[in-house]
Amino acid sequence: MTQNISPAGSRAGAVVAAPRTPAPPDYGFHWLRDSGIVMNVVRQGGDRVRMRDFVTFNQVLQQVNTPAGLGEPRFNLDGTVDQTPWGRPQYDGPALRAIALIRFAEDLLADTNPDMGYVTGTLQPMIQKDLDYVEGQWSAHNGFDLWEESQGYHFFTRYGQGKAYQIGARLFRRLGALAKAAEYDHFASDIHQSLDSFWNAQNQVFVPILSPQGGSAGKQNLIDTSTILAMISDSDNDAWMPLTDERVLSTMFRQLDTFRNLYPINRASVGYPGVAMGRYPEDRYTGSDTGAQGNPWPLVNDGFAQIHYRLAKQLEQAGTVTFTALSLAFYQDLNPVANYHVGQVLAGGSAGFKDLLAHVLARGDTFLARVRVHLPADGSMAEQMDRNTGYMTSARNLTWSYASFVGAVQERALVTQYLGAH
Ligand code: NOJ
Ligand code: NOJ
């Protein structure tokens, strides 16, 4: 992962999505989305030197004139504009960058002698620039989704934006910028409310996109793991949308169930642990071809592992579980022998409750175990795993794949520590 941060020939702080190779796809660019997600994980690991380089690099990017303003999805590694025709604008990038910067500011403020000059002189103006930009764009229809395929209103994008406002408001209040904090609170709440409109009661899932335009042929926009990945786009949910929400659990279950029955390598007869998860079932992108049959992605598996770990912690915090018509399928699938039923309550501390938490954690582990099965001898991770053979395929050494793995492992350590202490 760190080899792809400030790689040779780039400007310091650039994060290459994946090193350029003779074979397609060419990911030799700094994506706002990938780098925001990656650097928030790097930050959490405590690497302030790389974080500062990333900040300095993004100071440059925020000044560059681009075809899509701050919604420009990716840059050359020297910080110049990439002129390739591309799915632009993408409005998740500035929000994900803001999340990484806000969290970094919080880290610094936790120091005994915080570097206030850097927090208020460097980070705060950059965060404000991104958040102020998002104010004008979050409800716009022209933005592309994180998969860079369809324009419309995107759950993933909105979740990241709302989350950035929520923690941005908290930071600005702490720094005494009360008017800005109130403004950001207001946007956080508007965006939060708008997420409800993505709930599809008939199919019992959060859908990824409303009013889609363009996109992969045949995509139904019902099952798409980006809605769940959205919920780990920040290092904490801070009760923004609790994972214990029955709609979230139902969405997770339906996604899992879809992929379990989709890829040949997921057949029970093959005997691999867990389930290999992809972006969405109708995916046609293989890295070199956009009209083929899509594959599972390690970063989705890692994300599902991480979300289960985080769920275990939130269940413990909630202190009790009640099975509802919407959440039952998720829990039942985790622990079939328990025979849970709707209306049943598991009280915190009870044997049944502990058993459930253990199953949530164990399920999380199966997603990582599955990626491990498909790792080559050198442990390298690509963007995808072949749906028939499991071999890593598409972009080699995708930075996001490593970061999602590290993010899951970091979360697991935090959660098991938390559960051990409770
Ligand atoms: C490249 C994008 O990065 C990928 O997400 C997309 O599926 C393909 N282009 C096809 O549009
Ligand atoms: C394709 C993915 O769909 C997109 O989300 C990502 O930003 C690019 N690859 C670069 O990794």
Image (cartoon, helix red, strand yellow):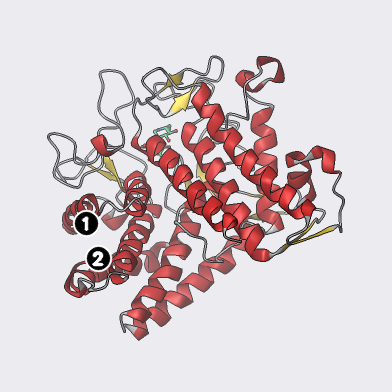
- Residue drawn at (63%, 30%), measured in percent from left and top? 274
The local crowd at label 2, few if under 14, some if 14 to 19, many if 20 or more residues have their Cα within 10 Å, is many
Under mark 1, the amino acid is Val
Position of residue 406 measured from the top left corner of the image (x, y, whole percent): 41, 41
Q: Is residue 145 above or below residue 346?
A: above
Position of residue 225 measured from the top left corner of the image (x, y, whole percent): 56, 42
The answer to whether marks 2 and 1 mark residues whose Cβ atoms lie closer than 8 Å is yes
- Residue drawn at (75%, 52%), measured in percent from left and top? 327
Q: Quadrant of residue 82?
A: top left
Label 1 SS: helix
Mark 2 or mark 1: whose residue is earlier in sequence: 1
Distance between the alpha carbons at the discs numbered 2 and 1: 9 Å
- Residue drawn at (60%, 47%), measured in percent from left and top? 308
Query: Which mark is on residue 217?
Result: none
Under mark 2, the amino acid is Met
Position of residue 290 measured from the top left corner of the image (x, y, whole percent): 45, 25
Query: Which mark is on residue 126?
Result: 2
